[in-house]
Amino acid sequence: MNANSDAELSELVDKVISGARVSDAEALLLYKLPLNELGALADHRRNLAKGAAYAGTGDRVVTYIVDRNVNYTNVCNVYCKFCAFYRTEKDADHYVLSHAELEEKLGELSEIGGVQVLLQGGHHPRLGISHYLEMLSFIRGRFPAINIHGFSPPEFHHFSQVFEMPVAEVIRRFKEAGLGSIPGGGGEILVDRVRNRISPLKANSDQWLGVMEAAHEQGLKSSATMMFGHVETLEERVEHLRRLRELQDRTGGFTAFICWTFQPDNTVLKAKPVGSSEYLRMQALSRIYLDNIDNIQSSWVTQGPKIGQLALKYGANDFGSVMMEENVVSKAGTSFRLQAEEIERLISEAGYEPRRRNTWYELMPADAPAFV
């Protein structure tokens, strides 16, 4: 690196430390930093964000939530190449959960003090709107203390087509029936060149973002995600981040960002998986670039507890979920599990104060009983 490049990089580092916004070109330059240096910058930006958000508690707080992933059906007709979970109606192990099965799962969640259900399924071609409205109303009526964090943007795009109804109207009807927030699933990489290769039948980039904008306009908060390490380029990862940042500038509706690496087992997508250092590098860059999203979640579900813990030094301030149940990533060969006690130990060992939160990243009382 020549003297001009050294000076340019030094100025960029100062810019990051000051909290200023970085451009796409600057993000690509930052990505080339030694991993420990990039991590230190991300940790600094994390402290800037959380010091303000958690006024009175300090920037040493790391949050987690007690929830359960419930996949209400595994029937799906978009056949994503990276997915090992979906089934067709011809497969013997396809299912649609009954209300009794939902009640059993959510009853178990309620018993351990859970505050959120992550409700997602496949793109079932034959379930009508009444099925979903009845499911939402049933959950809300039986478990009013549990927030329904449900249905990814591609699901909403699918619903719009099946119900022959505008996306905004579907969201309105679901919200009235009990939907409380929307997860950021199905984002993968928000670049259509990539999506056309890995999930050509799923919602495109504009449609994914359009669902989120419509939800934010109706007062629903959501998370945002990235699944990387397959056929995308670094420039396309940054384009993905830019599109999220631009939407957040308009709506302020994203509560958190979570990135994870492609898990290859039992999938038809042929790509060489990337390692933990690449994961940490991408998460660190995301913290710096996404200056308008306060919360970055560590992906211990795909990386394992130790890397999940290390990620707290690379920009993350949230340890995700106790996650009583997880069916999608585990089908692709990853099956890490943690209980609340283990999560709190990992957070404390990293030098932070563990605190439970709700869907909206509001801290729960420090003396709240720990059921799990």
Image: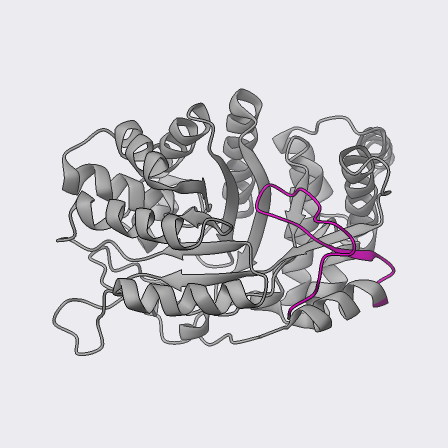
Tell whether 196 sits left or right of 349: left
Residue most extreme to the top: 250
Residue bounds of the magenta highlight: 349-371
281 lies above or below 154: below
Name the colour scheme.
one colour
Position of the C terminus by quadrant = bottom right
Q: Residue at x 32, y 69 (%)?
A: 101
Residue 305 horizontal/vertical position (percent): 68, 71
- Whether residue 129 is visible to the viewer of this picture, yes or no, is yes
| Residue projecting furthest to the front | 142
Tell me residue 87's x, y (percent).
Answer: 23, 68
Q: Position of residue 226 (x, y in %)?
A: 51, 49
The quadrant the N terminus occupies is: top right
Count of numbered badges drawn on the protein: 0
Magenta residue check for 290? no
Question: Residue sitting at 52 percent across and 21 percent down?
Answer: 250
Q: Residue at x 42, y 28 (%)?
A: 213
Q: Could you say where residue 256 lies in the image, as x and y percent from the top left? A: 60, 43
Instruction: Kindly report the secondary structure that dominates the magenta region of the rendered protein.
Output: loop
Q: Residue at x 55, y 38 (%)?
A: 241
Most foreground residue, 41 or 128:
128
Is residue 268 placed above or below 25 in the rendered structure?
below
- Residue nearer the viewer, 160 or 6: 160
* Residue 307 vs residue 233, the one in the foreground: 307
Residue nearest the observer in this picture, 48 or 183: 183
